[in-house]
Image: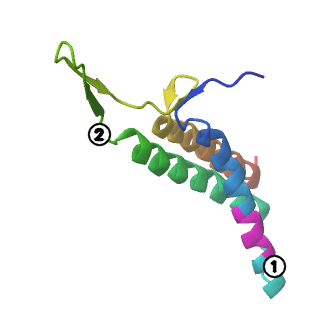
Amino acid sequence: MIFIWSGFGFLTLLVPIVAFIALSTFQTAVSAVGVLLPFQALVVAWSLVCMTMTWFVGRYFNTKPPRRYQDESTGEITEVKAKHSLFFIKMEYWSVFWLVVTALLLFAQLSAQSPV
């Protein structure tokens, strides 16, 4: 599979992995105390963590001011702004994807609990 990214856009793929490791560690620590969390709650929490982490990391990288370069011979000023994207979509907009995933997971969880 080919992944197309620019700048730190590859972090969009690493955020779910980091969130999964963090929530797995949290689940292990909580279960050692004797509290069991439902799997659905962990999946929704994972999706929410992915959404917020992707938004804030993307906003951090994509709102930095552009660098300015001046050509010595012509005096022309050029601004270079770094883009951080995955598949040509800015990092912070991938949080909308995680919002949709969270909504679908909540809908699936609620529809599975309601009697038909």
Q: In the image, 22: left or right of 63?
A: right
Q: Is residue 84 magenta?
A: no
Label for residue 31? 1
Residue that sits furthest to the front in the current view = 73
Q: Which residues are magenta?
A: 22-28
Which of 85 and 72 lies nearest the eye of the viewer?
72
The residue beneath circle 2 is 65
* Residue 43 seen in render: no
Three-letter amino acid code at the position of disc 1: Ser
Label for residue 93? none
| Secondary structure type for disc 2 | loop
Q: In the image, 8: left or right of 34?
A: left
Q: Determine which quarter of the picture holds residue 73.
A: top left
| Secondary structure type for disc 1 | helix
* Residue 75 seen in render: yes
Which of 42 and 81 lies nearest the eye of the viewer?
81
Residue positioned 26% across, 30% down in the render: 68
Cα distance, mark 2 to mark 1? Answer: 45 Å
